[in-house]
Image (spheres, rainbow, N blue to C red):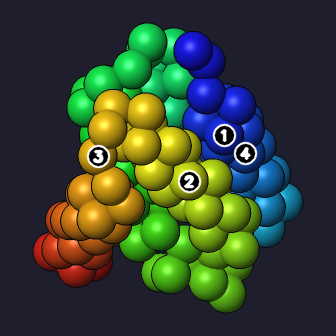
Amino acid sequence: MISRLGLAGSALAFATAGVYLALILSEGNDSPAEFVPWAATFGGIGIAAVLGSMLARGPIKAALFAGAGGTALALGLVALMSIGALLLGVAALLIGAANESWRDAGAGVGRTLAASGAAAAIALAVLISIL
């Protein structure tokens, strides 16, 4: 069963990448080294969500959604003064899709929160280490 929440989250992630690129380029930033990794990360979140949406069911589907949602949550908090609201929207949709997937697999909300929280913590640790 295709996840509508997952597809909506992936569409919003791709749109966020587009909005981010438009904002950066409109500000006259011509250095790809500064903005391409961020846009690629937003696109990666979208790709993970599309892949999760296409899987039938099971823990891998839920893990893709939870990982992508947790990463979007961490990035949304870091970028709150810029495109953070869009990323938080992505996070909400994908964490909802993860919860839906866990429920279909017979597990509870606790797994969704644990997996999303772990992904957010890892994403924040990586961000802190590279900044």
Which numbered disc flags the more N-terminal residue, 2 or 3? 2
Q: Which residue is drawn at 53% across and 23% down?
A: 53
Give the residue number, with chain letter if any, for mark 2. Answer: 96
The quarter of the picture where residue 15 lies is top right
Q: Which of marks 1 and 3 is in front?
A: 3
Which numbered disc flags the more N-terminal residue, 2 or 4? 4
x and y percentages locating residue 111 in the rendered image:
25, 57
62 shown above or below 20: above
Give the residue number, with chain letter if any, for mark 4. Answer: 12
Whether tag 2 and tag 1 are in contact, CB under 8 A, the answer is: yes
Which numbered disc flags the more N-terminal residue, 1 or 3? 1
Whether tag 4 and tag 3 are in contact, CB under 8 A, the answer is: no
Which numbered disc flags the more N-terminal residue, 4 or 1? 1
Q: How far apart are marks 1 and 3 (CA)?
A: 18 Å
Question: Can you see residue 10?
Answer: no
Whether tag 2 and tag 4 are in contact, CB under 8 A, the answer is: no
- Residue 5, which numbered label? 1
Is 61 placed left or right of 1 in the picture?
left
